[in-house]
Amino acid sequence: MTDQTQSPQTALAPATPDRWAEFAHLLRGNKITFAAVLLLLLLVLLALIGPAIAPYGATTTDATASLEPPSAAHFFGTDALGRDVFSRVVIATRLDLAMAFGAVVLSFAVGLILGPIAGYFGGWADTVIGRFVDTLMAFPLFVLAMGIVAALGNSVGNIVLATAIINLPFYIRTARAEVNMRRDLTYVEAARMAGNSPWRILAVHIVPNILPAMVVQASLNLGWAILNAAGLSFIGLGVRPPTPEWGIMVSEGAGYIFSGEWWTFTFPGLALVLAVLCFNLLGDGLRDLLDPRSRT
Amino acid sequence: MTPLLQATALRKLYPVKQGWSRAQLHAVDDVDLTLAPGECLGLVGESGCGKSTLARLIARLIAPSDGGIRFDGQEIAETDLRTFARSPERAQIQVVFQDPHESLNPGFTAMRIVSDHIRSLIPGLTPIQVTARAEAAFEDVGLPLSLARRYPHQLSGGQKARVGIARAIAVEPKLLILDEPTSALDVSVQAVILKLLGVLRAKRGISYIFVSHDLEVIRLICDRVAVMYLGKIVECAPTAQLFAHPAHPYTRALIAGSPDPARRGLKTERLQGSATSPINPDPNRCRFAGRCPLTAPECTAQMPQLRAVGPDQSAACHFAQSAPAKTES
């Protein structure tokens, strides 16, 4: 008999779930997510205090020490102008993370508005939003980002905007599909029966339940956004050169691939790889945390 | 006695595309139905016969294409759905949905599911009154309050069904529409839930419309049964009468199709062929013709109307015999 209601004493009901204890518990059970969270904390810490702990200034040149290999004085070596690569990699964290987060927050917010509208109301709203998404998807996305930055101008704000726009289709589609799936479930019908307006049904009964899928999407997308911002800088359409930024550093270092000064591009490239890896691994962990079915 | 609910010529058509032409799917076609206060009416029929659509029409979850619904002396079919959802009558007609797993918001606790419903439907209650009502509803359906803080996925199927019932009765409806409330449950849990529904009805005097394809469940709980076939009611009779003397050949086939230990070893009569399409059906032809063992020329020339074949019993068949005299049984 699965119905336990005859025996009230079996109901050792959990207290209001302590989210932090739960979080710690989930992390203990998942070493990879734990590593990703540590990495994220490290990245965020570097972003916050990077300039303070960097041994050299980001743009401090030293003509006597150009292109030096990694040493005790310069952990990651120096570049052609004698700038300390380690300091530049550390200081660049803030800009790279800020651009990625900015872009993701922007596309997440817009996607979370347009996607549910298309998925819930259908009809012409769905058609208009769907065609808009199709139009965006019709371009090679990186080329579209290049076009946007080229048209609007080379600034951090425009890189964020371009990155947000090219990632928007994924958010809209995820949200639309998730809402569409739930639109006709009977719990939504019950909410409709209770006289809730469509907007309230969306905001209270549907959208909170699609957040896990959206957050996973956002986390995976953060890696993408970093790559995109760095990629734009790499081809010269992003942040301007003296500014420390991983993409530019790889781009500047790329000239030394054949002459053997590997540290100039390897370390910023490694920073990119770690950041992208961190966000992708985090995506899986977050899904576990946010899925109501995993709440105990 | 004035009926609690009276549906007249209720009809729901869905437009469908058939190649180039537009056609209409007759989900519910010209249905008349009455329900007395405190009565439990069963609605049976095979999958796709329109019983769920009829239930949803009466529950005002979908708008009828045509026809009227009189509830508690008021015509409610003409109000549009959004306006009706805000009217005081909304709380009077409540639905217990089919699948307890998908009829509860996975992100809400059991308590919030019930109290949200109360808050939306009965304006002007203080939060304490809402909680008190929800707790009373939990008690009525036999759910310990310690489970109220759980999420649906932490509840068993039977407990979820109870939450669904608690949500519906917490706003004190006069009519409860049960859309196959037990079909997703284990047989043992089914029995417990049916018993609970019986108790609630006796205690609160709520009228039920019980939709099911399970004749045994209907037999157990209903006073009167309406049998549906392809959007039409083909027979309506008190439960005992219907099972003892079914007048319509489809009802006979339905009853013959449900397992009965008393008939073990006997050959059951099976219907031949499949149901005709509900899309643009011929208005002058009996819906059951072709599948019916009695098919005669008049069946394809004229649609049989629902007519009285005995006291309280009506059937839509040209050959429906009046029930045998009481002395015979």
Image (tube, coloured by chain):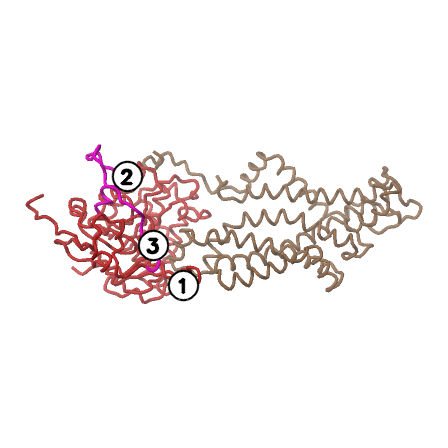
Chain colours: A brown, B red
Q: CA distance from mark 3 to mark 1?
A: 15 Å
* Residue A175 placement (x, y as % from top left): 54, 53
Tell me which amino acid carries mark 2: Ala
Q: Amino acid at mark 1?
A: Arg
Same chain shared by disc 1 and disc 2: yes
Q: Residue furthest front?
A: B297
Question: Residue most toward the left?
Answer: B327
How dense is the environment of label 1, judged by Cα within 10 Å: few (below 14), some, or many (20 and up)?
A: few
Left or right: B20 with respect to A288?
left
Q: Which residue is labeled 3 in the image?
A: B277
Q: Please identify the quarter of the rendering in which residue A269 is found.
A: top right
**Residue at label 1?**
B22
Type of amino acid under label 3: Ser
Which residue is disc 2 drawn over?
Answer: B191
Image location (x, y in percent) of residue B58: 30, 58
Task: Confirm or deny contact between disc 3 and disc 1 (CB under 8 A).
Answer: no
Magenta region includes residue B286: no
Q: In the rendered structure, which disc, 1 or 2, sits on the residue that comes first in sequence?
A: 1
Magenta-tinted stretch: B251-280
Identify the secondary structure beneath mark 3. Answer: loop
